């Protein structure tokens, strides 16, 4: 099954930049989850050094999310990448 993974690279000092923007970012996450487009999301062990990721059901949803995500547009994220991923666990 085709999935699309967005990897976020945190901006410098993400722990001070994220809190004021987080409520709007969270609202966007919930919107995409409720639509069924966002399947998984979370940070890695050290968000400053390792960033975070989100898994979407379609490329279009992933691109739409990133395009208007407050974390991207307001500098909480300094870079992002989108990768296609073949989920095989559902086939096992």
Image (cartoon, rainbow, N blue to C red):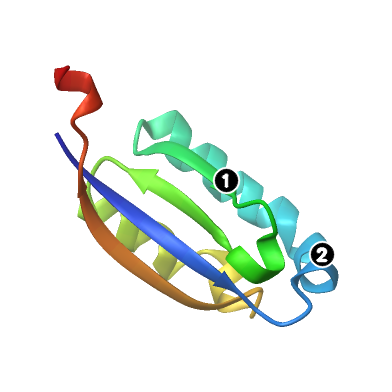
Residue placed under numbered mark 1 in the picture: 42
Q: Quadrant of the C terminus?
A: top left
Q: Residue at x 79, y 73 (%)?
A: 17
Position above or below: 57 against 48: above
Q: Could you say which is closer to the camera, residue 92 or residue 25?
A: 92
Circle 1 — which element? strand
| Residue 69 horizontal side relative to residue 27, left or right | left
| Residue 60 horizontal side relative to residue 20, left or right | left
Position above or below: 49 against 65: below
Density class for disc 2 (Cα within 10 Å; few <14, some 14-19, many ≥20) is: few
Q: Earlier in the sequence, mark 1 or mark 2?
A: 2
Where residue 64 sits, quadrant-wise, is bottom left
What label sits on residue 78 in the rendered view?
none
Q: Residue at x 70, y 59 (%)?
A: 46
Q: Residue at x 66, y 73 (%)?
A: 76
What label sits on residue 20 in the rendered view?
2
Position above or below: 89 against 83: above
Q: In the orientation shown, which residue stands out farthest toward the right?
A: 16
Q: In the orientation shown, which residue stands out farthest toward the top?
A: 92
Position above or below: 90 against 65: above
| Residue 14 horizontal side relative to residue 63, left or right | right
The location of residue 77, given as percent across then percent down, is 59, 74
Q: Could you say which is closer to the camera, residue 40 or residue 68?
A: 40
The location of residue 63, given as percent across then percent down, is 31, 62
Q: Residue at x 65, y 79 (%)?
A: 11
Density class for disc 1 (Cα within 10 Å; few <14, some 14-19, many ≥20) is: few
The location of residue 4, given as percent across then percent down, is 27, 51
């Amino acid at each position: 099954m085709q999935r699309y993974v967005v990897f976020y690279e945190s901006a410098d000092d993400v722990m001070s930049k994220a809190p004021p923007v987080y409520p709007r970012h969270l609202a966007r996450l919930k919107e995409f989850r409720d639509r069924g487009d966002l399947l998984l999301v979370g940070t890695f062990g050290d968000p400053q050094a390792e960033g975070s990721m989100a898994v979407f059901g379609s490329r279009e949803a992933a691109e739409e999310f990133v395009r208007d995500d407050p974390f991207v547009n307001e500098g909480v994220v300094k870079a992002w990448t989108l990768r296609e991923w073949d989920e095989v666990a559902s086939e096992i």
